Amino acid sequence: MAFAEDTRLALTALAANKMRSLLTMLGIVIGVAAVVAVVSIVQGLELMITKELQGVGTTFIEVAPDLGPRRPAMAGRRVKLTWDDGKAIAEKVPGIRLITPVLQGRTTLKYGDRQHAPPALQGVNQDYPEVENHTVDRGRFFSRVDFENRRNVVVVGRRVVEELGLGAQPVGKEIYVGSYPATVVGVMEEKGQSLGRDLDDVAYVPFNIAVSLFGRDAGDAIQLDLQAASAAAVDRVRDGIEQVLRQRHRIPAGEANDFTIQVQDELLKTVGSILGNVTAVVIAVVGVALLVGGIGIMNIMLVSVTERTREIGLRKAVGARRQDVLSQFLIEAVTLSLAGGAIGLALGYGMGVAAAHLLPGWPPAHVPLWAVGVAFGFSALVGIFFGSYPAGKAARLDPIDALRYE
Amino acid sequence: MPLIDLKDIYKIYDMGAEKVHALNGVDLKLERGEYVAIMGSSGSGKSTLMNLLGCLDTPTSGSYHLNGVAVEELDDQQLAAIRNREIGFVFQTFNLLARTDALHNVELPLIYAGVGRADRRERARRALERVGLADRLHHQPNELSGGQRQRVAIARALVNDPSILLADEPTGNLDSATSVEILELFDDLHRAGNTVILVTHEPDIAQHAERQVQLKDGRVVADHPTVAAVHA
């Protein structure tokens, strides 16, 4: 029997039991919707993070103390990474264009009777804007002179301007950073939100001021951000940094580093692998949902075969062969699961879009074509797999018994 | 060559402890264009014989030639094909597809015969006209009377021009007035050249046929032309 005929027949049969068909599809709908929603969100995230990381350029390098728990040999010794390390690196490693310390802490800013504690108060040097590819919008960033003379200056983000009520002319205003009075010299360019984090809720002070603010210990475990002179130099610079730091930290040969060096490439890879893991876990969970959905389909198809025993007998009496009956019920099962897949796809995309709209700073949902393919492919597979037993049962029915079935 | 040639047919069902001899050496020849009633009480083997004649089943032993084809040698696939081509079933309970209009019900055998859609539609329409239902093409079974349903079933049996119309108690579920109409339809079809086999336990109905075959305990006990009965 023609495929088109089977499909029409299947649609008629499913339409005849709308509620039942819908409930049967539900497992598939939920499974596919979940996977599509998660994939759309994760893909959106990945796109955004990638774009953000690429914003700092391919010559970006980040050095951080390795505070991970996987270093028993170093137990008892404090992991350090200081600005002295940074200065040594700048001096000894060729191919570095710029380097800045990044000391992150939290303290309250005050202006008049208003106060605000941005989640990130960073102690950096004058090269920070260029290293991070994040420029000043109004006023200026602090200079080398500010830095070396320990001038009490501060550069703030847009959000801080609003929270403290610095008004239309924030540059030149005197605020308190913790207990230090400081002059606002610049306002950073707006960056917007990312992952629910407000990138404009920041303030920058010269690194040595930050050390005074947060205490000497805070300066012992900082992060170093660098720009290599060229993309080609990145690997050489990385090796150079490793050499200098191992020597300065007196790490014996054969022992692991007490710091990590990440180049942008690796950051991208790390992000990719984290998101990949998230996706894999969700897909595994969804696999279970699809399994359950498939069992639901099998159950209903078995009921349907029993209900339509006489119909099957009649079809065989008028000339249906086994494979005709088999394909009729198989196509019915696949139609069910594909319809479930399609509804799930639409629903999942809707959820992704809704999530992107509802969460501030969340990236727009993005459903890649492969996810659509996977959704439909898996739905079809589930239909074929779980439909084949009931369909086989129908095909094997003896026409005489089937016609006599009450 | 006879249309149907049964030779020494046995059908034995193995019911575990005992073997049931449903047919015990049946010999029967039917020519093209005959109008035969197969009669017998329940347990006579009449249903078993009908299943064999309709190629729904194969005999335990003996030979069955339908149109020169040895049916007992056919496999499942070939039986399905021969049912499709050679046999038009009419059942006591009509066996129409629910929620499917008359036209689509009648089309069914043609679908399995691989007939194209337009052709199918046309032939189904003509078959329905032939049974007097030209104005009921798009009615579903639940919108039709019992007699009309059986007419749809007869149209379905006719649509693929089978060699045999095989009717199993076709009036069993109908009132007597409707029964007469349906039997007259069979009479008409016979006059038009169709081979008709009526399976029934009612002598009144068998009277419509030209030949009566009586079964008892799996054997043919009588086989004679119908004698015009005088109804008291």
Image: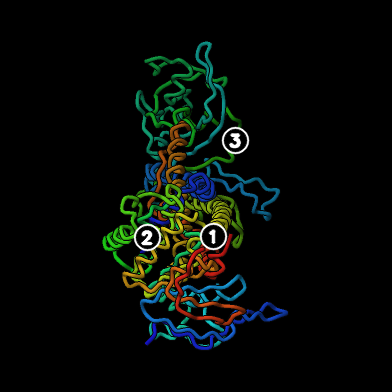
> In the image, is residue A35 above or below residue B180?
above
For marks 2 and 3, give the one nearer the viewer: 2
Q: In which image quadrant can residue A133 be found?
A: top left
Look at mark 2 in the image and give the residue it sits on. Answer: B106
Residue B168, numbered circle: none
Q: Is mark 3 on a helix, strand or loop?
A: helix
Kind of residue at disc 2: Val
Residue A366 on image: x %, y %? 40, 44
Does mark 3 fall on the same chain as mark 1? yes
Q: Mark 2 lies on which chain?
A: B
Residue A73 on image: x %, y %? 68, 55
Residue A305, numbered circle: 1
Taking depth in this image into account, of B43 and A394 the one nearest to the observer is B43
Q: Which residue is drawn at 33% across and 70% down?
A: B191
- Farthest top residue? A113
Q: Is residue A281 visible from the viewing direction of this image?
A: no
Look at mark 3 in the image and give the residue it sits on. Answer: A218
Question: How many other residues sit within 10 Å of disc 2, few (<14), some (14-19) or many (≥20)?
Answer: many
Residue A212 on image: x %, y %? 57, 28
Disc nearer the start of the sequence (1/3)? 3
